[in-house]
Image (spheres, rainbow, N blue to C red):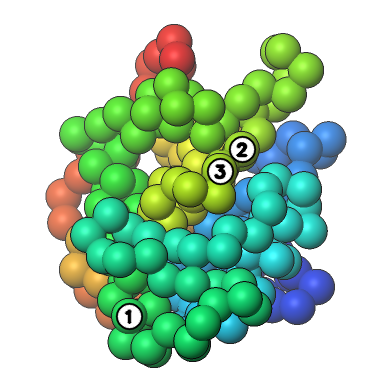
């Protein structure tokens, strides 16, 4: 059963770390970054800037964007050069919309729908790339990407590296969209607070070519 993994600054209880399921030579920091965003979404421009700095900039995955957007809204400034601090409600609406799109994509990815188009989109757009040709997949988001696409690139890289793990263990509550990796507790589509719905809990027979 996957166990919690400690981060230097925060603990994300849904992060899997079972030695038998995670390659010993590949850190899962991208998954930690993505789970941090959806589990404890930043509610201010400063908090969002800190998330970028800690999980993406410091890791060398991208430069911190001066602006973020979710397509439906105007750009929201994050940089120190911004003429005025963004309204807190603008950041909250943008983050909530990005989080909802990410979680909806993960829900659709689970069986029986098994819709993995967001993986193909991440590959086709170059938001995930193989290191050294045939090495592990790495997230490579760009500053101009939608916030949801940046977060999805983090999930996509981990799923592409550990596809069988996610096929077998990823759980997203149908009611509250909580992410977990322990289907034995509440099924694939439930959580401790909500009853699971009937979902086929099987691994895919083969990994599709992407």
- Checking the image for residue 195, the label placed there is none
Q: Position of residue 124 (x, y in %)?
A: 43, 21
31 left or right of 20 in image: left
Circle 2 residues within 10 Å: few <14, some 14–19, many ≥20: many
Judging by the rendered image, the residue that carries numbered circle 1 is: 90
Residue with the most extreme left position: 198
Q: CA distance from mark 3 to mark 1?
A: 22 Å
Q: Residue at x 48, y 48 (%)?
A: 144
Quick check: 70 above or below 21?
Answer: below
Instruction: State the image coordinates of residue 64 (x, y, percent, origin top left).
Output: 65, 60
Q: Nearer the viewer, residue 6 or 197?
A: 6
Tell me the SS state at disc 3: loop
User: Residue 140's mark?
Assistant: 2
Residues under labels 3 and 2: Cα distance? 7 Å
Q: Which residue is mark 3?
A: 142
In the structure shown, which secondary structural element does the residue marked by tag 1 occupy? Answer: helix
Of residues 10 and 92, the one drawn nearer to the viewer in this rendering: 92
Q: Give the position of the C terminus as an image quadrant.
A: top left
In-image side of 34 versus 145 (left or right): right
Q: Residue at x 34, y 47 (%)?
A: 106
Q: Identify the residue at image location x=48%, y=87%.
A: 84
The quadrant in which the N terminus is found is bottom right
Which comes before the other along the chain, label 3 or label 1?
1
Label 1 packing within 10 angstroms: few (<14), some (14-19), many (20+): some
For residue 25, say whether it is visible: yes
């Amino acid at each position: 059963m996957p166990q919690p993994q400690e981060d230097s600054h925060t603990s994300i209880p849904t992060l899997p770390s079972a030695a038998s399921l995670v390659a010993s030579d590949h850190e899962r920091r991208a998954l930690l970054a993505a789970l941090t965003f959806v589990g404890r979404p930043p509610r201010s421009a400063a908090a969002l800037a800190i998330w970028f700095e800690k999980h993406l900039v410091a890791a060398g995955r991208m430069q911190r964007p001066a602006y973020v957007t979710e397509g439906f809204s105007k750009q929201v400034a994050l940089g120190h050069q911004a003429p005025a601090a963004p309204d807190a409600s603008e950041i909250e609406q943008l983050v909530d919309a990005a989080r909802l799109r990410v979680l909806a994509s993960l829900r659709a990815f689970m069986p029986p729908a098994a819709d993995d188009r967001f993986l193909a989109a991440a590959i086709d757009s170059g938001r995930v790339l193989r290191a050294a040709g045939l090495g592990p997949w790495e997230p490579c988001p760009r500053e101009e990407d939608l916030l949801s696409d940046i977060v999805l690139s983090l999930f996509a890289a981990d799923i592409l590296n550990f596809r069988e793990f996610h096929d077998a263990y990823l759980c997203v509550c149908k009611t509250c969209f909580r992410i977990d990796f322990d289907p034995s507790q509440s099924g694939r589509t439930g959580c401790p607070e909500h009853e699971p719905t009937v979902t086929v809990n099987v691994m895919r027979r083969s990994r599709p070519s992407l």
